Image (spheres, helix red, strand yellow):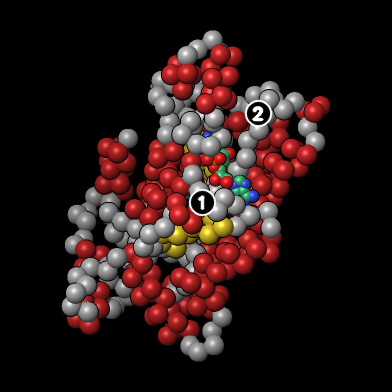
Amino acid sequence: MDKIFEAQASAFSPRKPAPRKTALKVQNISIESAVVKNPDTKIMNQLETVNNILSQAKAAAGDNASILEIAKARKPFQPELDEYKPHLGKVAIVTGACGGIGRATAERLHRDGAVVVGMDVNPAIVENLAGEGISGVVCDITDNEKFQAAVDAVAAEYGGIDLIVANAGIFKAGEYIEELDKSWDLHLLINLTATQRFLKFSIPYLKHGFSASIIIIGSRNFSAPGPGAAAYSVTKAGVTQLARVAALELAADGVRVNTVHPDAVFDTEIWTEEALQKSATRYGMTVEEYKTKNLLRTEIKSTDIARMVSTVAGPVFCATTGAQIPIDGGNDRVI
Ligand SMILES: NC(=O)c1ccc[n+]([C@@H]2O[C@H](COP(=O)([O-])OP(=O)(O)OC[C@H]3O[C@@H](n4cnc5c(N)ncnc54)[C@H](O)[C@@H]3O)[C@@H](O)[C@H]2O)c1
């Protein structure tokens, strides 16, 4: 997979990666001038890069500028593309980032250069995402006021928002339509309505972001639903349609919106040992067989989804919006 990614990255830009010092050039002020001020800092790290951009944007926006005015003033200071850290200079938010796909995605975006804030209702996120340029915030995304305040706080802290990943979600299997009641409402609230709110709160900043991108985590269930998962499948169809409309609405502002559709990813909280065993038995398979029952016979891990998300949000997909990208090992019901 890594080889494929590298091949795609080099196909996108055949030129040799610029040396780090020039890659970090911000407008006409190269990072070399910062090195002169601070002889210990040969190369700025990603947090310093974002903070450096923020100070320049603040100076450009003038005294008493609002958070949004500062975000607007940031645009001219976008760093040149660094092939090895394609998200350098960007500020990213990932919801549901305490574990599973969300945590892997937050860590991957950070590794690929972004300053990342993860949000999750689980307080363990604070410990799970602690590092320079990566942090976790406790936030229930169904609480509109707190969610908006958390998004605004990220923009205020780092100067804007360039990349969001709407990942938080719940999945309850084995619930048939005639039994669905509260669980239906909860799926809609967390998986669908909170995704629309996330877009609503972030779009004002994304419109002024650096190569801005929205990634929606969909599901194989969208195109190939199964019985007992109506609530979940409906929400995944909903977010997919939301992404398509958002792509139409935001293209003029240069904001790309794409949906990534994973199939079963077992190193996540959604899949307990018990659920896995039950599903394997239902198919008359061992757990190992069940984990690789796709066409390519490969187990898909959270880190695979994370790499895909970072790639779709990055320069390889710079001319793609409104797309749906499966990452499911090949599924004959989808193909
Ligand atoms: N694991 C799979 O098989 C699979 C397959 C296809 C799609 N997905 C999708 O991937 C996404 C991530 O799921 P995962 O598999 O990593 O599961 P997960 O349960 O490990 O992660 C989901 C995260 O969302 C958080 N969350 C739930 N409600 C929240 C709320 N109200 N506010 C804030 N955070 C909240 C949870 O605390 C959790 O950390 C989901 O959208 C899911 O539908 C998962």
Q: Is residue 9 left or right of residue 163?
A: left
Q: Earlier in the sequence, mark 1 or mark 2?
A: 1
Give the distance between the C-alpha atoms of the residues marked 1 and 2, in whole angstroms: 25 Å
Name the residue: 29% across, 65% down: 45
Q: Position of residue 5 (x, y in %)?
A: 32, 41
SS type, badge 1:
loop
Q: Which residue is mark 1?
A: 124
**Disc 2 within 8 angstroms of ligand 1 (CB):** no
Residue closest to the eye, 80 or 160: 160
Residue occupying the far bottom of the picture: 63
Q: Quadrant of ligand 1?
A: top right
In the rendered image, which quarter contains the N terminus? top left
Q: Amino acid at mark 1?
A: Ala
Q: State which mark lies toward you, 1 or 2.
A: 1
Q: Count how many numbered circles sit on residues in the image.
A: 2
Residue closest to the eye, 44 or 33: 44
Q: Amino acid at mark 2?
A: Ala
Q: Position of residue 65 (x, y in %)?
A: 54, 84
Q: Position of residue 41 (x, y in %)?
A: 22, 72
Name the residue: 25% across, 65% down: 23
Mark 2, residues whose alpha carbon is within 10 Å: few (<14), some, or many (≥20)?
some
- Is residue 317 visible in the rendered structure shown here? no
SS type, badge 2:
loop
Q: Are dots 1 and 2 in contact, CB under 8 Å?
A: no
Residue closest to the eye, 135 or 91: 135
- Is residue 154 visible in the rendered structure shown here? yes
Name the residue: 54% across, 30% down: 272
* Residue 173: assigned label: 2
* Residue 55: assigned label: none
Q: Position of residue 283 (x, y in %)?
A: 56, 13
- Name the image quarter holding residue 29: bottom left
